Image: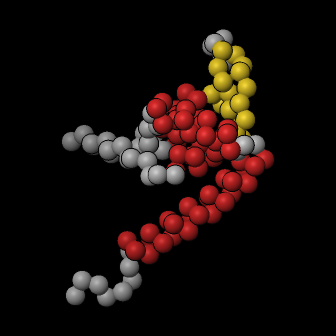
Amino acid sequence: MARKPPARVELMRGTLDLMILRTLLAGPSHGHAIAKHIQRTSEDLLQVETGSLYPALYRLEASGWVGATWERSEKGKRARYYRITPAGRKQLATEQSKWDAFVRAMGFLLKPTGEEGR
């Protein structure tokens, strides 16, 4: 019997910025490549739509966490390449710390060690 692929997961509010900043640690990238990286890295569980990605990139740029320049892509087309700034690296560390604490707290709630359900 063929294995059913897992359903896509909806992004939680506030996680897209974290994913973009983390993706840009590897180096400058254009929007389509950022979205593909997130999709590939999450084993196709997360898909970032254009309507969410570009507003997030503009917001990150306005915050000073991402810089952008127009360059030629591998295919010779003009594309806007985004890179993480020093302020973005600092923000990424802050957000990652918050995320780690959230995951830890959810782990406690979802796998309690007490005597529940009696």
Front one among 44 and 20:
20
Q: Residue at x 29, y 84 (%)?
A: 116
Q: Position of residue 14 (x, y in %)?
A: 52, 52
Location of the C terminus (image quadrant)? bottom left
Front one among 55 and 20:
55
The answer to which quarter of the image holds residue 8 is top left
Q: Is residue 106 above or below residue 25?
A: below
Can residue 23 be seen here?
no
Q: Residue at x 44, y 69 (%)?
A: 106
Query: What colour scheme governs how the chains and residues are painted in the rendered image of this protein?
Result: secondary structure
The answer to which quarter of the image holds residue 93 is bottom right
Q: Is residue 84 above or below residue 80?
A: below
Q: Is residue 55 left or right of residue 97?
A: left
Q: Position of residue 104 (x, y in %)?
A: 51, 70
Q: Is residue 96 left or right of residue 117?
A: right
Front one among 11 and 62:
62
Can residue 35 be seen here?
yes
Q: Is residue 75 left or right of residue 106?
A: right
Q: Residue at x 44, y 42 (%)?
A: 46
Q: Is residue 83 above or below residue 88?
A: above
> How many callouts does the rendering have?
0
Q: Is residue 31 left or right of residue 43?
A: right
Q: Position of residue 2 (x, y in %)?
A: 25, 40
Q: Residue at x 54, y 35 (%)?
A: 55
Q: Position of residue 27 (x, y in %)?
A: 71, 36
